[in-house]
Amino acid sequence: MLKLLKEYPTLILAAFKRFPLAIAFAFLTSVAFIFCVDGLPKLFPTRTTFSRILDFWLLIYPVAATLIALTTSLIQESRKSTRKMPQILTSVSWLVISFTLSLCFITANNWGGKESIGHIIICIYVLVCIALIYGPFWNQKNDNALWVFGNKISDSIAISFFIVILFSIASFALLKAINAISNNTDSSSAPFGLVIVFTIFPILCMAGLPSIDKCIGETPTLKDYITTIKLKIKSKQFSISFDSFKHIFLPLYAIYIVTVHIYDITALLQWDLPTEAIFYLAIGALACVVIINNEYYPALIQPEHSSEKTIVTVLSYTCIFPIATATIAVIQRISEYGITTNRYCALVSCIFLCIFVILNCIPKIILSKYVIIIFCAILMASSIGPFSVTNITHNAWLKNTEKTLVSEGYTAYPLSEKDTKKFFSDLWNKDGHTASIIAYQVNKLHSRSIEKLYQYFPESSDLADISKKYPTISKTIKNDEVHTMPENFSKFAFVVYTFKHEELVTRNDTLFFSYPLKDIDSTSSKVFSFYIPKQSWLDKDIKVLETEGARFEVEYIRFRQWENKKHQRERDLRLVGMLFME
């Protein structure tokens, strides 16, 4: 790594000759982002459709254009081609595709359409990144060159990140010092930061990219993790050498995987499956196995037996149970609470991970490009088309809504607002579990303006509030702030107090609450109880609250009710006014 660091000035100059178009797009990326931050708001003070399209296009086009140009250059380098036509075709194609996607995204009239276009853009970025790594070595008969390339890329990114961090600290410190000396408080460091992230860092990474021919010609060798510790005791010198990967990382992984197995077995026996925790523990186990496979890959391709081969073979089986448990947990969660975007993505991820684990356990080395083909197929299928996350979740929610309506006796659609309120009210009283699922699904469809939902419910209604177990209520009344001391009263105090949910009681459409006098006189334990009938709220006539020994003249009163995430009612009462006491 130190050798690579010393060679960087020469490598940067070579990168300009090797990747001219990619570096040009890297400069364009910074210019585009700076324009989006500073120039576009000034050029278009009022947001128009064209300015929104331009803004979105400038955000998605240049970064992908840089990656596409770099990928094309590397593939041409592997094929010994110097033709300009591939660069022209890929660059022009992405220009047309990106502008079309931007136009469709901004002009889409519902959330579902925007989400689908967003998924397409994500797929393009992921595919380009995969092509950047696998494209130059696609025709190779083994993964040797890919392994060499991947490890050298890791070193390049690490060194580039280190240089950028040091450069950023020094540059921003210098910029602050110059601004302090010149008393300039208006200058922004955002443009400079954008140049560092989107131009300097990519150029440094490109400079560290190894030659494709060198990667193909190099034989993978095990990394040297031998660490030597020298000790001097009573003029005698001792040295201890050990393999830090084998004697530190592998034991830590052993402890981790044993803990994960115990956790998963306990969860299965109790049938209490915390899906998120189980899923991420499985991902962690698989990530460790991938790291171990990568580090010991040079030993795996050797024909003779070795301890490294045994370690990889044994540890490859250790992530089977966590992945299987994660799959069971996700399926159980879906069956109990219904499908959601996150659960569908988790299920698709588990399917891919199961395939990956099975292939990884096969004694014969499977080329990684076949795994990537499966990954890309699953990614495309789950992002675009009839099996996409958007279509699957929306259709499942609509079918579940219709099924519940039919089971509750509703067959004539769309329901009126009155019938909609009755449907949700009855459902909450009858089956809170089903009601919470239907309310969530209807709210999501309504917030995304999915037209098919309005086959069942009125579009003009506030479905987000109607579907709640406890509807949102907010009532405020303001009165005069002039007060006169009533007869037979000798004490008074100005009160500003907010009653919490547990301090409020409702009986027979009347709200009861008690105000403690200790807020005025801490030596007294006198408490005054007040009540407000529902009709007073409807008439907006709450000027005086009276009780034995006290009279409260209201300046301001506000009552709020809402539903928390656990479908529990929350309330508060804000009271401002003058309290008169005998």
Image (spheres, grey):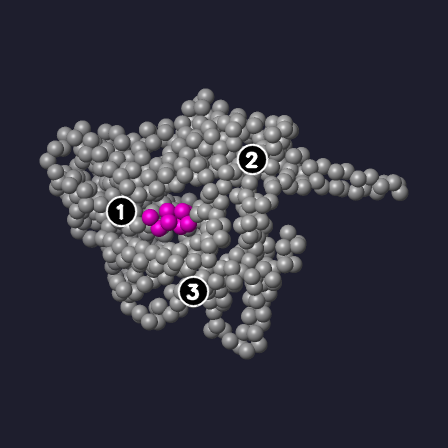
Residue 228 lies in quadrant: top right
The residue labelled by disc 2 is 293
The residue labelled by disc 3 is 28
Using the numbered discs, state the Cα–Cα distance from disc 2 to disc 1 in whole angstroms.
40 Å
Crowd band around label 2 with a 10 angstrom C-alpha radius: few (<14), some (14–19), many (20+): many
Q: Amino acid at mark 3?
A: Leu
- In the picture shown, does residue 284 fall above or below 33? above
Q: Are marks 3 and 1 in contact (CB under 8 Å)?
A: no
Using the numbered discs, state the Cα–Cα distance from disc 3 to disc 1 in whole angstroms.
31 Å
The residue lying toward the viewer, choosing from 373 and 287, is 373
Label number found at residue 112: 1
- In the picture shown, does residue 476 fall above or below 280? below
Tell me which segment is drawn in magenta: 120-128
Q: First in sequence, mark 2 or 1: give its number.
A: 1
Q: Amino acid at mark 1?
A: Gly
Magenta span contains residue 123? yes
Q: Position of residue 108 (x, y in %)?
A: 24, 53
Q: Position of residue 330 (x, y in %)?
A: 39, 31
Residue at 52 percent across and 28 percent down: it is 364
